[in-house]
Image: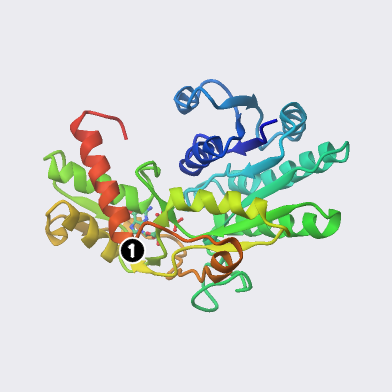
Amino acid sequence: MARRALITGITGQDGSYLAEHLVSEGYEVWGLVRGQSNPRVARLPKDIHLVRGDLLDQGSLISAVEKVRPDEVYNLGAISFVPMSWEQAELTAEVTGMGVLRMLEAIRVCSSRGGEIRFYQASSSEMFGQVRETPQTEVTPFHPRSPYGVAKAYGHFLTQNYRESYGMYAVSGILFNHESPRRGAEFVTRKVSLGVARIKLGLATELRLGNLEARRDWGFAGDYVRAMHLMLQAAKPEDYVIGTGRTQSVRELVEAAFSAAGLDWERYVIADQALHRPAEVDLLCADPKKARTQLGWEPTVPFEELIAMMVESDLRLLSEGGDP
Ligand code: GDP
């Protein structure tokens, strides 16, 4: 019988790549969806099964897990855009933080009736925040710098705690920023790739950005979902850092994106103080050695190639009149 996976956040960037990967691995894939009104649900491939439920509603998660009886649960659902977490701090805590508790409880209750359910939690490099050391590893202490980072740290520690308290196979992947043509338009890589495409096509004349000096470790989302799956196949449940081990500034991202379209960024980019954050994460850089040695995981798409892929995709999308 096919293995069954239940994914929360299936309509997001990672959910879509993970669903495709698991289908290609022979899984029966189920997505937790809140309702029918989300247009992205209608666009999911036909081989994805849907089950109703909400990370804010404990009973709905128990019902969903009971109905699907998954072998693996991937918790990717979250309020995930950092600036929004200041505007809606309580909702972020409820969905991104307490949602982990509710899903772990649903799994604990349902698996006590027999059958192991493995759990993957989408932890985030934003937990490192004001970093204590560089590069960051599985044992680097956390100092989150946004309500989002704080909520993710809660989910991370809770996943560890359920593993230790109940012997559950529950793991966290501490994923550094991962991008793709499917990235939400509010994140900086996609904002830049869309901005470059608009300027190239004569649809815009400038691009306003915030802090150009922030540094991130940016990889390709398609690579990172393979790591999620590998983590749940390991002999022992452990947490892993997933990143490329390289870091670039927003300024370098901008240079790479404009040059991919043959444009000089300095003519178009305006650094806008209003887009700076109340507290910033200045530098992130992963040490993915553990994932490489224990899982055999490697990133395959270098930074410049990733950015060029996103610019090309947005040029195509906008010139065909598509909706980002
Ligand atoms: P995050 O690392 O999860 O917050 O991912 P983002 O893509 O939203 O932001 C990455 C970095 O880019 C942060 O340090 C932002 O401050 C910086 N940045 C600079 N300008 C912008 C902008 O216009 N939009 C966003 N989203 N980030 C920006």
Q: Nearer the viewer, residue 34 or 236?
A: 236
Residue at the spot 40% in from the left edge and 60% down from the top edge: 218
Q: Which residue is mark 1?
A: 211
Q: Is residue 95 left or right of residue 125?
A: right
From the top left corner, tell me how far across and down residue 269 is, in percent: 19, 57
Tag 1: residue type?
Asn
Q: Visible in this render: residue 97?
A: no
Q: Is residue 273 left or right of residue 217?
A: left
Counting labels gives 1
Q: Is residue 82 left or right of residue 273?
A: right
Q: Quadrant of ligand 1?
A: bottom left
SS state under label 1:
loop
Q: Nearer the viewer, residue 124 or 129?
A: 124
From the top left corner, tell me how far across and down residue 228 is, in percent: 58, 51
Residue at the spot 32% in from the left edge and 69% down from the top edge: 213
Residue at the spot 73% in from the left edge and 47% down from the top edge: 101
From the Cβ of disc 1, is ligand 1 less than 8 Å away?
yes
How many residues crowd mark 1 within 10 Å: few (<14), some (14–19), many (20+)?
Answer: some
Q: Is residue 8 left or right of residue 168?
A: left
From the top left corner, tell me how far across and down residue 157 is, in percent: 71, 60
- Examine the image and state in which quarter residue 154 appears: bottom right
> Looking at this rendering, what residue extends furthest in the bottom direction?
133
